[in-house]
Image: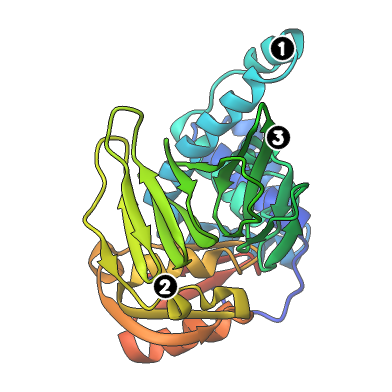
Amino acid sequence: MKALPDSALMITPEQHQAALSWLSRLHDQPSAADQARFKRWLHADPAHVEAYAQAQVVWEMSEAPAVRLAVEEAVALETLLSAMDAPVAEKRRSVPRWGAALAMAACLVMMVGVGLGWQPKRWVDDVGADFVSPPGEVRTVTLADQSQVTLDADSAIAVHFSKGERHVQVRRGAAFFQVTHTGEPFVVEGGRGETRVLGTQFEVRLLPEGAQVTVLSGRVGVKAGADLPQQILTAGQRVRYDAIRTTALQAVDSEHQLAWRQGWLNYYRTPLADVIDDLSRYYPGRIVVLNDELGARKVSGSFPSKDPVAVLAALKSVVGFEQYEAFGRVIVIR
């Protein structure tokens, strides 16, 4: 596999997207007329040649993860459409579904355009959210009962206070809670389970399957589902749960683990893939790991969250992976 072309040519986002569009079209049995138009476009500007070369390399590196991301985004987009007015949704559903090649190209366009609007999964999370933090920014908000919630970068919560109970749903990312005691129950929902406040300071972090709860002080009760028993956590304890089970309690240095609030990401023998997932919340684009064996490698260290590119450089020097950058929005690791 070759590295991305090194060029001093300035390529605009429009040229990148045009190159990806042509790449998709040429992979889907192009007509003679399409091939002729492509040649005219390619020869019209040296930047077009450069943009197309970059698109080809990214396509080669990203085929498998792009298919996965395209499926995820398609599901999220369908969910978003179902929440819209029926006539608009039906009109948009009438558009023909993507073929495999077009799905990959569309996903790559989405990767290039992160931060520019094409993010169906984030749209779905944000539609019902009351507070949102953008990628790279930790945000603290004060709720109506004076409780404070610190959102990790790229996170979202929905708040519903009524009928003598206070409910918060973590819709994306992670949130750290400092709860004001009012005599009313305070319940945090996330990953199909719930955390009921018996104390004051704790974090709820969504995981691919469920959530993780870490207590800094006081006590909380965690239930993975309505029919499962509640587990009581106290300061310095952590638990994970999915739809059917809760893990055993784990003793942790909660101050160390929750240092993201002060701009630090701390890890001890953590899979590289999990570290990259955290860094992705602080990077204004996509970071894609192509090698599962590499992703399982364990790393330890303390890293500043404000400079994910520098963190990747440090990890690269220790772990020894290959890294490619494209379009200023995509980092591919293999």
Q: Three-letter amino acid code at disc 2?
A: Lys
Of 283 and 102, the residue lying toward us:
283
Residue on which the image places disc 2: 2
Asked whether the beta carbons under mark 1 and mark 2 sit within 8 Å of each other, the answer is no
Find disc 3 in the rendering and name its residue. 127
**Number of the front mark, 1 or 2:** 1
146 sits to left or right of 286: right
Quarter of the rendering occupied by the C terminus = bottom left
- Which-is-in-front pick, marks 3 and 1? 3
Q: How crowded is mark 2: few (under 14 residues within 10 Å), some or many (20 or more)?
A: few
Label 3 and label 2: CA atoms lie apart by 41 Å
Question: Residue 274 vs residue 164: left or right?
Answer: left
**Mark 1 = which residue?**
91
Instruction: Using the numbered discs, state the Cα–Cα distance from disc 1 to disc 2 in whole angstroms.
Output: 42 Å
Depth check, front residue: 231 or 26: 231
Q: In which quarter of the image is residue 295?
A: bottom left
Q: What residue type is labelled 1?
A: Lys
Q: Is mark 3 on a helix, strand or loop?
A: helix
Residue 174 position, x and y percent, is 54, 57
Q: Residue 105 location, x and y as percent?
A: 55, 44
Sequence-first disc among 3 and 2: 2
Marks 3 and 1, how far apart in space? Answer: 20 Å
Which x, y percent locates residue 89?
69, 15
Point out the tag, 3 or 1, that comes first from the N-terminus: 1
